[in-house]
Image (cartoon, helix red, strand yellow):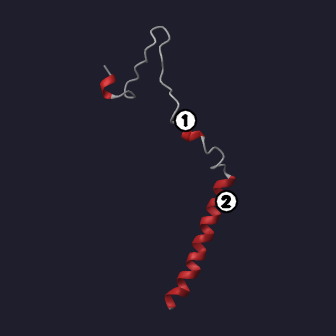
Amino acid sequence: MEVIYNLIPGMIFFGLVFVGVLIWAIRRGQYDDLEGDGNRILMDDDDVDKASGSRKKRPGLNFPDEDD
């Protein structure tokens, strides 16, 4: 029973800290663009050579079998 007297104030303290961090993150703009990162990974940003229509080789960024 004595442990509960320490746990309850401790959990209230941690809860207030987490609420404070959430409010700080909202004010700093962490949640302004929720869809940007999700759409960014779907966009195809491969460099295409307009003359030949093929992709430009970028060393270290292509799959191993494409680095010929």
In the displayed structure, would residue 7 be above or below residue 29?
Answer: below
Task: Tell me, yes or no, whether the two marked residues, 2 and 1, touch with CB atoms within 8 Å.
Answer: no
How far apart, in angstroms, are the residues tagged by discs 2 and 1? 26 Å
Question: Could you tell me which residue is drawn at 60 percent across and 76 percent down?
Answer: 12
- Left or right, residue 51 beside residue 27: left
Q: Secondary structure at mark 1?
A: helix
Residue at the outermost top position: 51
Front-most of residues 55 and 61: 55
Question: Could you tell me which residue is drawn at 43 percent across and 18 percent down?
Answer: 55
In the displayed structure, would residue 65 be above or below residue 36?
Answer: above
> Few, some or many C-alpha atoms within 10 Å of disc 2 (few <14, some 14-19, many ≥20)?
few
* Image coordinates for residue 66, horizontal then vertical, percent: 33, 23
- Read off the residue under disc 2: 23
* Image coordinates for residue 35, horizontal then vertical, percent: 60, 42
> Few, some or many C-alpha atoms within 10 Å of disc 1 (few <14, some 14-19, many ≥20)?
few
In the displayed structure, would residue 15 be above or below residue 6?
Answer: above
Q: Amino acid at mark 1?
A: Arg
Q: Secondary structure at mark 2?
A: helix
Label 2 or label 1, whichever lies nearer to me, is 1
- Read off the residue under disc 1: 40
Q: Amino acid at mark 2?
A: Ile
Question: Could you tell me which residue is drawn at 59 percent across and 39 percent down?
Answer: 36
